[in-house]
Amino acid sequence: MTDLEVLIVGGGCHGVGLLHDLASRRVDGVHLVEEKTLSSGTSSRSTKLVHGGLRYLEHLSQWPLVREALNERALLLRLLKGLVQPLPFVLPVFKGDRPAWMLRAGLFVYDSMAGDGGLPRSRKLTGDEIFDAAPYLKRERINEQTTGAFLYYDAQMLDDVIVRVAAEAAKKLGGTYEENASVVEVTPLQNEQGFKVKIKSLSGVRELTTRTVVNASGAWNNSNLLRWGISPKIRCLLNQGSHIIFKTSAITEATPKDSAACLLQNKDGRVVFFIPWNGQWLLGTTESVLPAHSPRGLKPTAEEINYLIDAAELNLNIKTTPEHLAETFAGVRTMPIIDKHQPFKSQELKSEWIDNPFASPAYLQSSEGLNISALSRETVIDEAMPGLFSIYGGKYTTYRAECEKLAASLCRRLGRGGQSTTCTADAWFIQEILQQMPEIFVSSASTRSI
C-alpha cells in the first residue's frame, strides 16, 4: 500500500492541469511538488495567447494539433471569462512573402476548423480599416511594403493566473500541492509497483511512496531524470523566446484597449507578435537555442532585445528608448526531438551529466540541421520506466485536453477514477475563488524569478 496514487513534479500548466483533472475525477492521493512557486517558469513567460497556431497550417502533419487547439480556445473562452478574452489580429500581406491568396486560404481553413467557436470569422480589410484597427502601424511601411491585410481572431490570457486558479480548484476537489520543495530521489520499490521518493522542503526532508510519478517540469524534465539516476529516452531542444513589454506611453497614436494585435515582419522575414496586453504593449517572440545552460534565472540577451526593437521600429510608430520599456522577459520552450531514423538511445549515466545535466546528450546544444519554426508543438508523453512518465513539449492552449488524456490513461492503470469535469465550469469554482482569494486574479506579468 503506497502513500500516494500519483505524485506530480512541476507546477506549470501541465503539472497543475494534471492535478486538476485527476482531482476532478475524484482520485484520492494526488499530490504536486513545485521547486519554486506555481507558474514561475515558462507558464508565466509566454506570449499570453490562446490560439490555434495559424502558421502551423503550413505543415499538414500539424493540422490535428491546430484543430485541438481551436477546440480548446473555444472551451477556455467559455469557462474562463476574464482570464481568456477574444483578441482581433491584423495580418498584413507583405510583398515577397506569402501571397494574399495563400493567407486567405489559410484563414478559411482556420475558421472552418474553429466552427462555431465563439469568435468572428476572418475578413479582408480596406486601407482605412487597417489603421482603424491598428493605428500604431507606420503608414508608409504598410502602404509601400504590403498589398493589404486581413483581420482574424484568436484570444489572449492571463497565463499565470490560470495556473493558480486551476491549482486552487484542484484543492477544492481533493488534490494537494506544495511549493518551494523538490523531489531529490526517486527509487523503484522492491516488492510492489511504485516508487519511494524523497522530498526536500523548507521544513526538512521526508520520504513517501507513490504508485506513479509524473515528471511535468518542462525544461527540467531530463535534468530530473538524470538526478534520479534514470537515463532519458527523449532528447530536448531548449528554445528561448524573449519579449519586451512597452509602457502605454510608448505609442501616442493608440491605446491598448482600443487596438487590435498585429503580426509584424522583421527584415529577415520572420514574424513577431505585437499585442495590447494588460494596459501595455507586448512584443515577442524570438527563437534561439539555449545550449549547456540551466533555464534558472533566464534573461533576454542584448541580441534578442535588439532584434525585437528593430522589428518595432521598422513597423510601428513607437518610442523604444529605455524610459518607455516596462520590462523584458524570456521563457523557454521545451521541444522533444523525435527522429525515427536516428532514435535517441538510453545511455550509461555519467557523473558529469548528473552534475551538469544541461550539458549532457539529453539536451541538444545547437539547432544545426533543424528548422525550429517547423518543429511540432505537439505534446509527447514518455514512460521512462513502468509508472514514471514525463510530459514533453506541448502548447499552453492545449494543456487541459492533453492532461485529460493522460489522466484517463492513468485512471485505467490505477483502476479508479471517474469522468473528467475540467471541461465544465463546476470544476473551476471561479466566483468562489475570486471571493476568497481576489489577489490571485492579478497577473504578475513576467516578474517572477525562474
Image: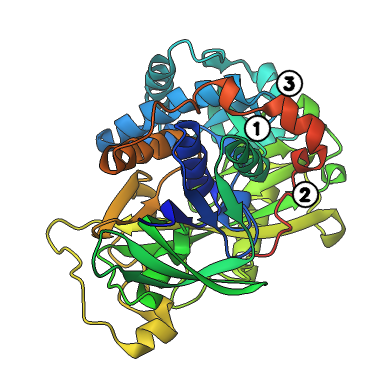
As measured in the structure, the alpha-carbon distance from the residue carrying label 3 to the one carrying label 1 is 12 Å
Per the image, label 2 sits on a secondary structure element best described as strand
Which amino acid is tagged 2?
Phe
Within-10-Å neighbours for mark 3: few <14, some 14–19, many 20+? some
In the image as oriented, which residue stretches furthest toward the bottom?
Answer: 351
As measured in the structure, the alpha-carbon distance from the residue carrying label 2 to the one carrying label 3 is 21 Å
Residue 246, numbered circle? 2
Residue at 25%, 61% (x, y): give it.
192
Which amino acid is tagged 1?
Ala
Q: Quadrant of the C terminus?
A: bottom right
Residue at 20%, 67% (x, y): give it.
344
Circle nearer the N terminus (3, 1):
3
Pinpoint residue 99: horizontal percent, then vertical percent: 41, 29
Within-10-Å neighbours for mark 2: few <14, some 14–19, many 20+? many
In the image as oriented, which residue stretches furthest toward the left?
Answer: 341
Pinpoint residue 359: horizontal percent, then vertical percent: 39, 80
Which residue bears the numbered disc 1? 261
Q: Nearer the viewer, residue 57 or 24?
A: 24
Q: Nearer the viewer, residue 146 or 332?
A: 332
Residue 132, numbered circle? 3
Q: Is residue 34 placed above or below 81 in the rendered structure?
A: below
Residue at 60%, 45% (x, y): give it.
47
Q: Nearer the viewer, residue 448 or 32?
A: 32
Per the image, label 1 sits on a secondary structure element best described as strand
Which amino acid is tagged 3?
Asp
Q: Does residue 250 appear left or right of residue 152 in this picture?
A: right
**Which of the 4 image quadrants contains residue 200?**
bottom right
Q: Is residue 230 visible?
A: yes
Colour theme: rainbow
